[in-house]
Amino acid sequence: MIARNYFSTHPVLRYAIEEIIVAYHADPMIDTHDFILIAVAPHYPLAQVTHFVQHHFATDRFLAFHAIDAFSGMETVSGIAMCVIAFEREGSIKTLLIEDMITYQDRAVNQTIAYLEANRDATHCFFSGHLEGEFSTFIDALEAAGEDKTLFSRFIGGACSGTRDPLTKETLTYQATADRIVKRGFVLVSFCGCDCAMSASLGYNPVGVAYTITGVAGKGNVAIDHNRSFIHTIDRLTRNIPDFEIRHLWYSPIVLLDEADGSITVVRTFKAIHHDSVEFYTPLKIGTRFKLSYAEPSNLLQADAQSAQEVVSQLPQCDLAFNFSCIARQYALEDRQKEEAKIYSKLLNAPLFGFFTFGEVGSKRNGKGLNVYNQTSLLVGITER
């Protein structure tokens, strides 16, 4: 497989596309394409992006999607980033498009399970609408419906990131193909005839006592604190912070603890603090044990390096890498956020493509089942057989 990245930050869409086209035609390493991925900042009109791609590349084999920022090699791009893929041996790409995964959830789950069963050997990259967090209810339903949990062992991706449309009031986390714009669904891009290795980078260290969620509301995103012990802890943490806003707690998200050994399974990002409850960006379950956590940028980057080494140990030769990294994690990285892409690119020695997410999705540590993550960086390396 040959994969090449191109990008432009020109504010005018036409000129941004032209810059990418010029770079592509000047590249001696690639002169054809089997599939194209395009990360599009929300200020560009998505429909026009697809028009320009069809016109200049003469193809309908592409996926465009919203991303506030994207990874293009070692660069973090607030513009348009494009990954052009050409296969040389056994590789190919299949796609599954689901237009409404919430209203018709049962149908969407059944279609996805059937697709995964028919393509067990593929690596599935998930590009989803955020839907104000509702994408996670679909993932929970999908995971529950898969009788064979190994079905999700090669499943990875995230919810696209975007800004709120002032007219529709909907957050722009769309995907676009040659003939449609998907606003309430997702697209799976499946790499067939390829080997892969995956890893999840957390880097948050648990601190303090463990709490237990005693009640939930609002689709499970609101954790009710009946005895108010956790609320009192949050009050003590935040009362002396000048001009406190919820993003300050992104430096100290909660980590969910494994029931068996107490290890960290996933991270959850604060969304709001209420009188007797705490709201998160992703649902929680009654009885879940958790702790507060803390990480400095150096801790997060160290976890990234370890994650990349895990991928390299499983996949010494990598043709293309994808990174799905939470936008809250990028906030916590502060002025060192660009180092994450550099670490992955250098250690995997491969083109890196990906984007800032509003939530990540990947297989569980044992490869059996799916997790919805927050403040996590998911990495997958892919090589053609």
Image: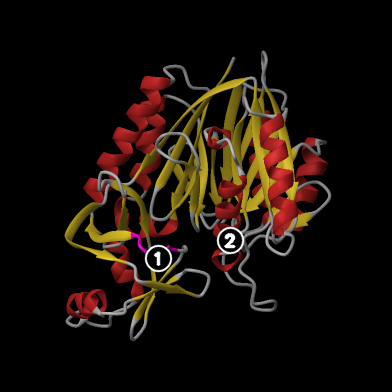
Q: Relative to 13, is 208 on the left or the right?
A: left
Label 2–label 1 contact, CB within 8 A? no
Query: Given this view, does label 2 or label 1 mark the residue nearer the observer?
Result: 1
Q: Main secondary structure of the magenta part?
A: loop
238 sits left or right of 8 in the view: left
**Quadrant of the drawing holding the N terminus:** top right
In this view of the protein, can residue 297 be seen by the observer? yes
Residue at coordinates 66% horizontally, 60% vertically from top-left? 44
Q: Amino acid at mark 1?
A: Ile
- Residue 120 falls in image quadrant: top right
Q: Residue at x 25, y 48 (%)?
A: 262
Tag 2, which secondary structure? Answer: loop
Q: Is residue 286 above or below residue 261?
A: below
Residue 115 image offset from top left, x and y in percent? 71, 37
N-term-proximal mark, 2 vs 1: 2
Residue 5: x and y, percent? 57, 35
Which residue lies at the image location 61% right of the left edge and 61% below the top edge?
Answer: 42
Q: Which mark is residue 16?
A: none
Residue stretch in magenta:
284-288
Mark 2 lies on residue: 130
Q: Is residue 89 above or below residue 295?
A: above
Residue situated furthest bottom in the rendering: 275
Amino acid type at image mark 2: His
Residue 11 shown left or right of residue 241 in the figure: right
Image position of 293 (left or right of 307): left
Q: Which residue was labeled with disc 1?
A: 286
Q: Quadrant of the C terminus?
A: top right
Residue in the image at 22% along x and 47% along y = 298
Q: Nearer the viewer, residue 317 or 2?
A: 317
Nearest the camera: 237 or 148?
Answer: 148
Residue 294 in percent (x, y) is at 22, 58
Residue 165 to residue 1: above or below: below
